Amino acid sequence: MDLNSPASLRLYSSVSVTSALFCNKDLFKLCQAQKHRVGWVAVQDCVAQQVKFLGLPQNVEVNIQELVQPLGDQIRRWLCRHEIVLRKKANLYNKLIWTAHALIDYKKTAENILRSEELDPLSRFNLACINAIVDYINLSYASVKNALDKDIKRCHRKNRSCSSYPAEVKIWISFLAQPDDEESITNVFQTVIKNGNTALARHFITKIKPDRKPELIKQLTVDVLSKTRSFNPALLLFLLSQMNNQQIMEVFIENAENSLLRFLEWPLHNYFMNLANKLWEFMSGSTFLAVVQAIVQRIIQHHAFPEYLSFENPYIYVDIFKNFWLCSPNEYRRLCISDMISPVFSYVFSPHNLHYAMSHLFNDVSSLEKIDELFFSNAYAVLHILSNDNKAAAIKSLMQNYLPSETLRTDFEDQYQTFTTRYLGHLLCGTLKYLTNLCICLIIIICIL
C-alpha cells in the first residue's frame, strides 16, 4: 500500500483554488471569527457560493466543491493551533503550503510567513517554536529570552499559567536548557505526538536513539490510531513513514478496527479499500459492523443522501460503502443483514408477524427471501435502509423500486399503511416531543434575553 503516491495536477490546482478562496481578504476575517465547528459551517458555505460564481466547467466545479469541507477543516485546525501567535496580524493569501496528500505543510507554511516579516519578533519566535524551524529558533532565542523569562516569572508569581505562549515554546525552552538529556527528549517526543504536532515530531525523532525507535514508534502509532476527534492524518502518515511494510501491517492487523475507522478520514479514505482488502482475514464480525455503521454515519453527517437509486453519485463515502460491502465475505454480509436490517423490518411491522405482513403485501410468498438476497448483493439497498430516518418510507420505496411490480398486491398502499400504523404513530410522537422540547428551549432563551 503506497501512501506516498504523488498527487495529480488536477488535485494540486483544485487545492490551490480552494485555499485561495478561504484566504481572501474579506472572507479571512470571517474565518478568524468562526474557528469553532458550528460557526465554521458559515465559512464553508461562503466558499461554496464563491465557487459557483467562478463560472468554471462543471467537472472542475465539482472537484473544487468536494474539497471545500476537507480543506476548510484543515485551515480551521491550522488557525486554531496558531491563534495565539497570529492574532489577526498575518495575511495568509498564498501563504499556505500543501503536501501531496492535500494537507497543510505546517513547517513550510510557517517559513513562508516568517519571510513576509509581518509579525513582531516574539510572535515570530513563537511561530518558529510551533513549527520546529530550528535555525530561526537558535538565531532569535537570545534576543527574545529576556522578554520570555520576564513573562514566565510574572505568571509564576501570580500563580497562573502562561496562556499567552504556545505549549511548544515551553518545550523548546526546556530542550535548549538540556539538549542532551535522553529521557527528556523521549518525553518531549511523546508529548508532541500526543499534542498532534507533526512538525515537532519530525524534528525530535532525529534525537531518539535508533535502538529505542521501533518499539516507541509502534506504540505511538497505536495511540494515534485510537484517537477519534483529535486524530491527525498527517501525524499518522509521518509515523508510518518511520516503519517498513511488515511493521506497518503488524500494527494494522493488531488494530484492525481502529485502523479501518481512521482510514475513513480525509485524505486517507483514498487508501481505505486497499487496507480493507488486506485485513479481511484478520477482521472480526463486530469490526465489520462497526465500520459499516461508521461509513453510514459519515454519509448521513456530510451529505443529504440522494433519492435516486443508482451508484452514479459524487459522494465518496457512498462509493466506499459500495466497494466495502460487495468485497466483504459472505458471512459478514449475512451478519449485518441479521443484526442491522432484519430488526428494522421487525420493528417497522410490529406488532404483526413479519411473514404474515409480507403475505398481505405481495402476491409472491417468497418476496421476503428475495428482499434478503437483494440486500446481500446490492449495497445501495442496504444503505437506503440504514441512512434514512423514516424506516417505513425507506422500506416502502425499496419494495416499490427493486421488486417487480407484478409481485405487489393491488392494495399494496393500503395494506402497507395498515401494517406500519404503529411505527408511524411512534415516529409522529417522537417528532412532536422534539418540537415541544425545542419550543420550551426557545421560550427559556427568550425569557433570559
Image (spheres, rainbow, N blue to C red):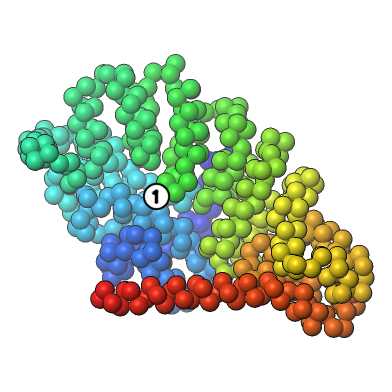
Q: Hey, which quadrant is residue 312 in on the image? A: bottom right
Of 167 and 137, the residue lying toward us: 167
Residue 337: image x %, image y %?
Answer: 75, 54
Tell me if residue 313 comes above or below residue 409 in the rendering.
above
Q: Residue at x 27, y 41 (%)?
A: 130
Q: What crowding class fits label 1: few (fewer than 14 Cα within 10 Å), some (14-19), or many (20 or more)? A: some
Q: Is residue 359 left or right of residue 37?
A: right
Q: Hey, which quadrant is residue 47 in on the image? A: bottom left
Indicate the quadrant containing the C terminus: top left, top right, bottom left or bottom right.
bottom left
The mark tally for this picture is: 1
Q: Residue at x 46, y 61 (%)?
A: 69
Q: Is residue 357 left or right of residue 224?
A: right
Of 19 and 305, the residue lying toward us: 305
Q: Residue at x 53, y 45 (%)?
A: 262
Indicate the quadrant containing the N terminus: top left, top right, bottom left or bottom right.
top right
Q: Residue at x 87, y 61 (%)?
A: 369
Residue 71: image x %, image y %?
Answer: 43, 57
Of 376 and 98, the residue lying toward us: 376
Q: Amino acid at mark 1?
A: Ile
Q: Is residue 404 visible?
A: no
Q: Is residue 138 visible?
A: yes
Tell me if residue 330 comes above or below residue 396 in the rendering.
above
Q: Disc 1 on helix, strand or loop?
A: loop
Residue 227: image x %, image y %?
Answer: 47, 42
Which residue reaches farthest front?
Answer: 351
Which residue reaches farthest top?
Answer: 211
Residue 54: image x %, image y %?
Answer: 44, 75
Task: Write down the residue under mark 1.
Answer: 104
